[in-house]
Amino acid sequence: SNSSKYATIVRRIHADINLFNDKARLFNQREALFNIPITEYNQINEFEKSFEPYHDLWDSTDKWLSIKDVWTSGPFMELDPDVVETTVTTLQKNLNKSIKSFDRLNLPLCSNIAIQMRDEVDAFKPKVPLIMSLRNPGMRDRHWEELSKRTHVVFPKDKSMLSLD
């Protein structure tokens, strides 16, 4: 998909920026060793800051599109509730930052993509407490039976058959 292609590109650029920052620190350390005036690499930081919304948008979009079907249609008992919670929170934070940046930069097409992804993540978020509760390591068969009685939902004996769908 295009989002995967764009994510690959922005991740490569992000890695390059990190490499440039590492090299700048190394050069500064060597300059300090020789008592040479320290060179300022402000352009790297400025570029990194201006590139961040694009990285966050495409990295978050790719992550969301690659995990949402696994989380909703895949085996429920294989979900790691902590990973789900952390990922949803991070995606929301990054997409909200991107939306604000793109609105400030007057880039409505980028903003619209970020809004669409954020809305999908927001629609999934109410399921997180359910995942956290039902995937609790202390959840036993007796708890599933009690839940079944209270909700009038029949859960299969083999919990590997469960999914969020």
Image (tube, grey):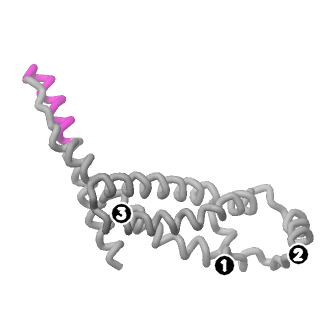
Residue occupying the far top of the picture: 35
26 sits to left or right of 71: left
Query: Which residue is labeled 3 in the image?
Result: 111
| Disc number lying in front (1 or 3) | 3
Q: Residue at x 66, y 64 (%)?
A: 127
Image coordinates of residue 50 in percent, x first then y, are 24, 50
| Disc number lying in front (2 or 3) | 3
Identify the element where label 2 is drawn. Answer: loop
Determine if the magenta segment contains residue 52.
Answer: no
Report the predominant secondary structure element of the magenta stretch.
helix
Numbered range of the magenta stretch: 23-36
Instruction: Give the vertical position of 50 relative to 8 (above or below).
Output: above
Q: Amino acid at mark 2?
A: His
Q: Amino acid at mark 1?
A: Asp
Q: Residue at x 29, y 69 (%)?
A: 6
Query: Which residue is labeled 2 in the image?
Result: 152
Image coordinates of residue 148 in percent, x first then y, are 87, 72
Instruction: Give the vertical position of 77 relative to 46 (above or below).
Output: below
Query: Which residue is labeled 1 in the image?
Result: 165
Q: Residue at x 28, y 62 (%)?
A: 107
Quick one: label 2 or label 3, which is nearer the N terminus? 3
37 sits to left or right of 12: left
Image coordinates of residue 77 in percent, x first then y, are 69, 69
